[in-house]
Image (cartoon, grey):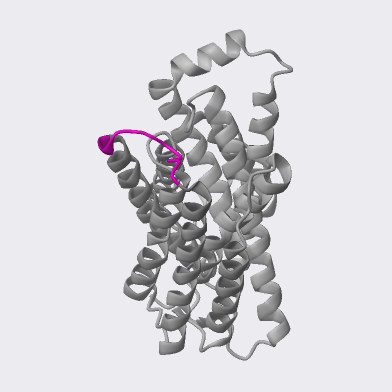
Amino acid sequence: RRDETCQSTDGSPLSTSVLTLIGWQFLAMVLAGTMIFSTRIAKRASIPVSQSIPHYLILAIVYGSYRAYQKRTFFPLELHIQWWKYLLIAFVDVEANYFVVSAFKYTSITSVSLLGCCSVLFVALLSWQFLGSTFSAVQLVSMCGCLAGLVILVCSDILLAGDEEELVHSWSFIAKGDALVILSSLFYAISNVSQEFVIKTFDLVEFLAMIGILGSILTISQSLILEWTQLEYLLNYASIYDTIWLDLMGFTLAMFVLYSVIPHLLNRSSATVMNLSFLMVDFWAVLASHFLFYNPFHWLRYVAFAVCIVSLMIFHSAKSVQFAKSR
């Protein structure tokens, strides 16, 4: 292991910080795209696990091949950390995706967005506990600013909805959906912090390759157990020209971009910055639905966007999060 200390933004030019924030917002837009594709897929079939199989397979093929080329050997035989630790990270990542996609069946998009902000708190606590991260008073205030921006987004949803409820599920269904969102937030936080530690301490390509290989095994196994009926229906009755295949392709491409770019940005910032940036996913999703599907757009969303962006810039320009690689 390397014995050194990494500081993500101290001493870096302002332009680097701005470019990093732009990169995170680009990924927030990509993540919003995955939400749109997931919603379209869910209208045709309930396959929250199976729809993740292709992108894990692509990660395994692309980064597994590249890692093998680097080492000139079968790389799983020479790992920087034990394989079972990668298995735990892959399991957490797979289940986080499963929980959040499943939650849309029980609760509203507004609730998912609001409760999803729990990941910011979970990431901050995990980073402080396990990575030795510290946050200045200015950064803590900027976190609150990002959360305030999300609250404004939710308020705009309520104002647009008026007296019409987006969903009319029973309270038990809503409670189940909310619990799934909170679970997904916790699992995403664990996955994000683990990813930050591994890529800053060991090897980025190895991480993506192992997540792809083990994630493929886990998703295929779980889908055969939980979703075989839905998969059988799709394979037997869905035409090759069915739009669900295009939606799956779009989802897979977006997820591959996310998993490929996130590690590079994590090297420049932190999991906390990532989760704060991803609070803007709701904004980009609604903006896309406004232009693509002509859904109404409330002016408060521009206010929320401005509040979040300013808060992110303050967080990123303040004293950087400390990350100690020596363990």
Q: 73 and 322: which one is in front? A: 322
Specify whether residue 183 is painted magenta.
no
Specify whether residue 171 is painted magenta.
yes
151 relative position to 212: left or right? left
Image coordinates of residue 191 in percent, x first then y, are 43, 55
Image coordinates of residue 318 in percent, x first then y, are 53, 88
Read off the magenta span: 163-172
Question: Image quadrant of residue 245?
Answer: top right
Provide the major secondary structure of the magenta segment. Answer: loop
Image coordinates of residue 240 in percent, x first then y, are 71, 16
Q: Is residue 308 visible?
A: yes
Q: Is residue 71 visible?
A: no
Question: Image quadrant of residue 207?
Answer: bottom right
How many marks on residues? 0
Residue lying at 68% horizontally and 66% vertically, measured from the top left:
23
Q: 35 and 69: which one is in front? A: 35
Question: Image quadrant of residue 303?
Answer: bottom right
Residue lying at 51% horizontally and 29% vertically, measured from the top left:
50
- Can you say which quadrant of the picture contains the C terminus? bottom left
Image coordinates of residue 202 in percent, x first then y, are 52, 65
